[in-house]
Each structure stands twice: as C-alpha cells, then as structure tokens.
Image (cartoon, rainbow, N blue to C red):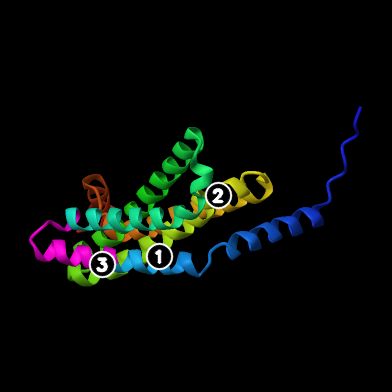
C-alpha cells in the first residue's frame, strides 16, 4: 500500500503563486491589443447604431456581442488545435457565453445607473460601461476561458480564484444596484410611519 506524502503548505502556496504568474504571463501583448481593438469597435458600433435611431438597449447589446465575439475569435485562434474534440469545444463556448453574459449584465447595470439615475448622456455613459464590461470580460476570459485547462489541474489555485472573482463581481453589482433601485411601496410605507409619534 502506498503511503500518502505529507502536505507542505509552503510548497503548495509557492506552487500556486508560480501557476498564477504563468497565467498572468499568458496575458501578452496580442491579448491586450485584441482587447483594445474590440473596445474601439464596440464603442464605434454603439455610436453608429444609436445615431441611426436604434434604442439604447439594442445598441449596447449588439455592440457588446460584436466586440466580445471578435475578441473571442481572435484570442481563441491560438488554441484552435485543442478545440478539435467536440466536448472540449462546447465547454469552451459555454464558458465564453457565461463570461460574456456576466459582463453584459454588469455593463447594463452601469448604463442604467448612469443614464437613468445620474442623467448622463448615453454617448458618454457608454464609455464607462464599456470600460467596466471590457475589463470584466477579459479578466474572465483569462482565468475562466483560455486558462481553464491549466487551472483545473490544481484545485488549490482554481477555487480561490473563482471565489474571489465571484465575491468581487457580486459586490460590484450590489454597489451599482444600490444606486439604481428605488424603495418598494412597502418600504416607503414603513419609512413614512417609522418616526416616533408626537403628542399633539
């Protein structure tokens, strides 16, 4: 019977840090250039659609998916040999779709806050929304789409990254929606009757 080797926490944490460094090194100049190109195309397409009379929602969703698909196609080109198997290909596409939908949700929330509550012009608000969504999409792409096969081999690196990313994403959404959502009627009712009654 083979005896299990004792775990060394120092070695495990060092190994995790080395894997994180390798993951970050893969985020090279090409990846950044493709991200900037998709950002510019996203912005220009939004401005064009909005100027032609399309609604704010249609313009931003269409331009987002055009930029995201362009970025995905150009960055996934390097790993085309790994995508020959059908199961790997569908897992790859489903991770892309999940990350894209999460980025789109954040972008829509930021746009709703800036245009709806803060009364920004849509052409200005989309800049902030695109920057935030592009950042979320590309960070998600690095850790959950392109490097998933590397990270999935070691749960010591995969789960902390997933946990921190999910907590940060939910916290950002919560902060955005705190400024967007008004009181529901029940909350307003209790707010009106909350002050202590005064004697007449």
Q: Secondary structure at mark 3?
A: helix
* Magenta region, residue range: 41-57
Residue 108 visible in the shown view: no
**In 3D space, how far apart are the residues under numbered discs 2 and 1 (Cα atoms)?**
22 Å
Could you tell me which residue is drawn at 65 percent across and 63 percent down?
Answer: 21
Q: Position of residue 48 (x, y in %)?
A: 15, 65
Q: Secondary structure at mark 1?
A: helix
Front position in the image: 185 or 176: 176
Q: Position of residue 25 (x, y in %)?
A: 60, 65
Between discs 3 and 2, the one toward the N terminus: 3
Residue 146 visible in the shown view: yes
Between discs 2 and 1, the one toward the N terminus: 1
Please identify the residue farthest to the top as the structure is shown. 1
Could you tell me which residue is drawn at 42 percent across and 69 percent down?
Answer: 33
Front position in the image: 190 or 61: 61
Q: Position of residue 107 (x, y in %)?
A: 31, 58
What label does residue 43 carry, if any?
A: 3
Magenta part mainly helix, strand or loop? Answer: helix
133 relative position to 186: left or right: right
Front position in the image: 121 or 59: 59
Q: Quadrant of the N terminus?
A: top right
Identify residue for label 1. 35
Depicted 137 relative to depicted 28: above or below: above
Residue 45 highlighted magenta (yes or no): yes
Identify residue for label 2. 162
Q: Position of residue 140 (x, y in %)?
A: 47, 54
**In 3D space, how far apart are the residues under numbered discs 3 and 2 (Cα atoms)?**
29 Å
Which one is closest to the eye, mark 3 or mark 2? Answer: 3
Between discs 1 and 3, the one toward the N terminus: 1
Could you tell me which residue is drawn at 53 percent across and 54 percent down?
Answer: 143
Residue 121 highlighted magenta (yes or no): no
């Amino acid at each position: 019977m083979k005896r299990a080797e004792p775990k060394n926490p120092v070695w495990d944490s060092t190994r995790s840090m080395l894997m994180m460094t390798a993951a970050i090194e893969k985020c090279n100049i090409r990846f950044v250039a493709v991200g900037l190109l998709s950002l510019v195309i996203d912005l220009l397409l939004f401005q064009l659609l909005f100027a032609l009379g399309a609604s704010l929602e249609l313009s931003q969703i269409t331009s987002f998916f055009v930029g995201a698909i362009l970025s995905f196609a150009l960055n996934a080109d390097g790993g085309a040999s790994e995508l020959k198997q059908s199961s790997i290909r569908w897992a790859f596409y489903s991770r892309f779709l999940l990350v894209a939908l999460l980025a789109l949700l954040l972008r829509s929330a930021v746009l709703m806050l800036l245009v709806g509550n803060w009364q920004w012009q849509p052409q200005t608000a989309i800049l902030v929304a695109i920057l935030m969504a592009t950042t979320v999409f590309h960070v998600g792409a690095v850790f959950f789409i392109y490097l998933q096969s590397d990270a999935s081999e070691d749960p010591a690196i995969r789960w902390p990254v997933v946990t921190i990313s999910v907590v940060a994403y939910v916290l950002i959404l919560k902060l955005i929606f705190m400024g967007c959502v008004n009181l529901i009627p029940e909350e307003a009712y209790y707010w009106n009757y909350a002050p202590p009654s005064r004697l007449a």
